[in-house]
Amino acid sequence: MPERKVVFSTCKSCHGGCGVKVTVEDGIPVHIEGNPNSLTRGTMCSKGLSSIQHIDSPYRLKYPMKRVGAKKEGKWQRITWKEALDTIEQKVKESQAKYGKESIAISQGTGRGYNRYIHRMARSIGSANVISPGYVCHSPRLGLYGLVTGYGRLYCDYHGWGGEFPKTQIMWAKQLEISSADSEMCNWFIHSLDYCKNLIIIDPRASAYATRATLWLQPRPGSDCALAMGMMNVIINEGLWDKEFVDNWTYGFEELKERVKEWTPEKASEVTWVPKDKIIAAARMFAVDTPGCIQVGSSLERQANCGHTLRAITCLMGLTGNIERPGSMISWVLPETGLIEDFFLELPLTPEMQSKIIGIDRFKMGAARTCNPDTMVKAILDGKAPIHVWISVGGQQIVHMANTKEVVAAIEKMDFMVHVDLFMGPMAQAADMVLPSAHWLEIDDVYDMHPRFFISAHNKVIDPPEEAKSDAWIFNEIGKRIAPEHWFEGEKELLDYQVRKGMGGKMKWEEFSKNIVSGCWGKDQVYYKYKTDYWRKGGGFPTATGKFEFVSKRLEELGYDPLPVFREPGESPYSTPELFKEYPVVMSSGFRQPFYFLGQYRNIPWLRSFMEYPMAQMHPETAAKYGISDGDWIWIESPRGKIRQKCRTFPGILRGMLMATANWFYPEEGPEGYHGVFISNPNVLTNNNHLDPMYGSPDLTCLLCKVRKCTEEELQENVFKTTEFGYIQRTVEK
């Protein structure tokens, strides 16, 4: 009989943090399922359920390797960890001595939970030039929530712990049920619909829940701020705002009233393409049937007006009093361990470091503690950026950043680049050294939910293959060599330190790993915090005015408009009408699927079987206009280049637009073209010139393109490798 055991852990196939139950026989994981006793109540998505294929993949990186020969040749030589770490130490110190501490850039992806290690590393070595995907995902909403309320953590209260569920829910550019990495929220959201009177879907494309929505609005991509302004116009003109909350707890209502005055339903309809009667209906529902909440998606942050769009939506929450009451938008009481973010926040971001952040002169919100990636790319190409060494972890900047051609050109100019990952991919092929990372099933670690109200344990199920190491180990070892005063003797000490706040400072990793989860929920939550001494004595919000700020004092100080303002995308039928004549289709690159996480997992056979090739959705009438049928390969072209994807006609998408599958590359393609990153990736088409004034976010989900069907000759010229979904690097022995 095989020796069988069950290990409880936390999934990190995205940053959703689902509780998992893994069955192990004779040291080999044989089954994985959701933990029914976790906050995700036994649910898991396809990404997590496929994890055994991740660890068993023949394409895993297993040894440190250095490049042999030129880039794009795909030749690598196995080296020892000592040689790898010694080389990194040497390259970093040489660059610091020659060009300054700010010459080191550290980039990250998302999902593996390594952001606290990246930030601590950067601060410990004296550079704040961190390249994070956060500027187009999640960070702007936290920053804007913070401007208005004084704290950056506002979440939908789906749980009913305060005695009420949301009566009206708005799902704005979000498909929480499939594309979110917020699995705990998804689970409770579905449950909360049993108590929901009005479900409002705001999305140019039908989501799974659009069919059961009370109201579905299809705004033109990039026009969401105008829609929010129009809704506030209706609420104010009809006297539907929450007068008790607005009169006693807000600042700048009269100014907001004046600002939205021009945004009549008629004007908002003209700009957004949403019928005015739907704008009016949505505004009335959200204002009258309270409590309510608004779940926003990252598509709103992938626009060059993301700052004011999120400002407008947040003001809509405050106008209706949907702040800190049960069933509305609330901040969570922190777990006893505190925020895992403290692990890097405790190291100061010095004025000198901050002054040398690339983009800080333009994007005073987005580049306050991390650099603006698009500005950095431009500066590198112009010879104005100080960056000479690039440490990359997990993320595929070549894939997910705007204007792929320029991103590749900038990366190729680096003096030295090292990439840490599970598999060979575009960033690995661009590197001079590749380090093998352990999978979440192969590590002990702590995990936080964004963070929200709990942290959880990752308990190691099996050992990593060969010489693969955890991200924590890798960063700790690099840190010990460059800034030893800020790092730890080993992983155990590092983990103990991160859970140090629990049990009066006495909780250590071993105890925490048995508890699995630390958090505050249910009766432990505090509602109406602004009516108590929670934030400030006598009540109020932790803002300069002590109130919810329709007029942001902080934005005013930074030289920005303190009230929401609509700004057209850099390319649109209205901002560039002449360009629209040549490129007459409005394009979004926001088509995501539940079986991929951004650029990950296209080399996992089971997951790839759900969508072998990237799909571009168009309305049947739009496709027919250009002689395109469902299933045709099509060329999609912008002023920056062209790509091809398969057409999927879909009557649930706005006429006149195309939604392309995001962040696509082909792991099976070789190193010559960075694994086919120029074949089908929509970011070949996106623009990195028009950026949000606050955050520096580019227009990734709202631009112009033209389309045509691929000819048979063109299809014959470009044949994909489809027998295997990965690439095994060539190695050269010493």
Image: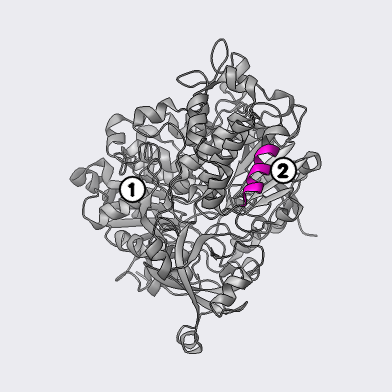
Q: Position of residue 454 (x, y in %)?
A: 63, 34
Q: Position of residue 62 (x, y in %)?
A: 49, 62
Q: Position of residue 305 (x, y in %)?
A: 44, 46
Quadrant, the C terminus: bottom left
Q: 143 above or below 382?
A: above
Main SS class of the magenta portion in the image: helix
Q: Is residue 263 magenta?
A: no
Sooner in the amino-acid sequence: mark 2 or mark 1: 1
Viewer-closest of 192 and 622: 622
Give the residue at x 42% y 72%.
Answer: 642
Viewer-closest of 194 and 606: 194
Q: The magenta stretch spans which residues?
A: 275-285
- Mark 2 → mark 1, Cα distance in angstroms: 38 Å
Disc 2 secondary structure class: helix
Amino acid type for the residue under numbered disc 1: Ala
Amino acid type for the residue under numbered disc 2: Phe
The residue that label 2 is drawn on is 189
The residue that label 1 is drawn on is 105
In this image, 611 relative to 223: left or right?
right
